[in-house]
Image (tube, rainbow, N blue to C red):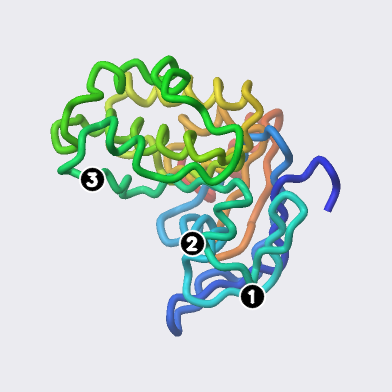
Amino acid sequence: MSAAEYLRITGLHAFYGESHILHGMDLVVNRGECVSLLGRNGAGRTTTLRAILGLTGSRTGSIMVNGRETIAMATHRIARLGVGYCPEERGIYASLSCEENLLMPPQLGSGGMSLEEIYAMFPNLFERRHSQGTRLSGGEQQMLAMARILRSGARLLLLDEISEGLAPVIVQTLGEIILQLKEKGFTIVLVEQNFRFAAPLADRMYIVEHGQIAQEIAQGEIHAKKELLQEYLGV
């Protein structure tokens, strides 16, 4: 694993019970990169994120996080290496206020963003900090789910379908936040169905099909590989 790499996955197989979902995934994410996993529903993109954190059933192969082999580690130990996961279902606690949701997860490492820094990046959350989780809009809940992992000290962010079902103006705001996080040196793996959202943000894109990487496309190759993207994604 080179010094530039934050995450390297080699020959990863993952299972839910007897269901074999990932069939030898291989990918690399360098420090400070935003890499997007694209593909149709059921291709194995979300399972890849969950496998990185040990949230699937069994898994084999190699997952190197910041130079550490994690394939046999428990989830809480992987999180302490600086991995933050923002799941598609968001996991906002309805009975807690916005700020209580934000403060609940423990800080797992040094370098987590302060409340002041988070509120500067997410002014909507500052305005709604005393509102119950159930009273937040879908976009505000998504912002809260993202902001929550920034307090933890995570430097590798696993973001799952953060644009799904949101109004275009909110999607644009989330894109701007991802660019800010890249400027701050965060490493991001972005699972997306929305190619038009992911394309301008990602340094590289991996197309996932049948639990494997089918293609790798660099930012500068998007136009030249438009027909290939159409074939795989229908965009």
Q: Which mark is residue 93?
A: 3
Q: Secondary structure at mark 3?
A: loop
Question: Where's residue 18, x and y in %?
Answer: 45, 84
Q: Quadrant of residue 86?
A: top left
Q: Residue furthest right?
A: 2
Residue named by callout 2: 47
Seen at 55% across and 53% down, the residue is 79
Q: Is residue 198 above or below residue 82?
A: above
Seen at 46% across and 30% down, the residue is 197
Give the distance between the C-alpha atoms of the residues marked 2 and 1, in whole angstroms. Answer: 13 Å
Question: Where's residue 128, x and y in %?
Answer: 23, 22
Q: Amino acid at mark 3?
A: Tyr
Question: Where's residue 35, x and y in %?
Answer: 62, 40
Seen at 24% across and 34% down, the residue is 138
Residue named by callout 1: 60
Q: Amino acid at mark 1?
A: Thr
Q: Are marks 3 and 1 in contact (CB under 8 Å)?
A: no
Q: Which mark is residue 174?
A: none
Local crowd size for mark 1, using a 10 Å CA cut-off: few (<14), some (14–19), many (≥20): some
Q: Amino acid at mark 2?
A: Thr
Between discs 3 and 2, the one toward the N terminus:
2
**Camera-side residue of 44 and 132:** 132
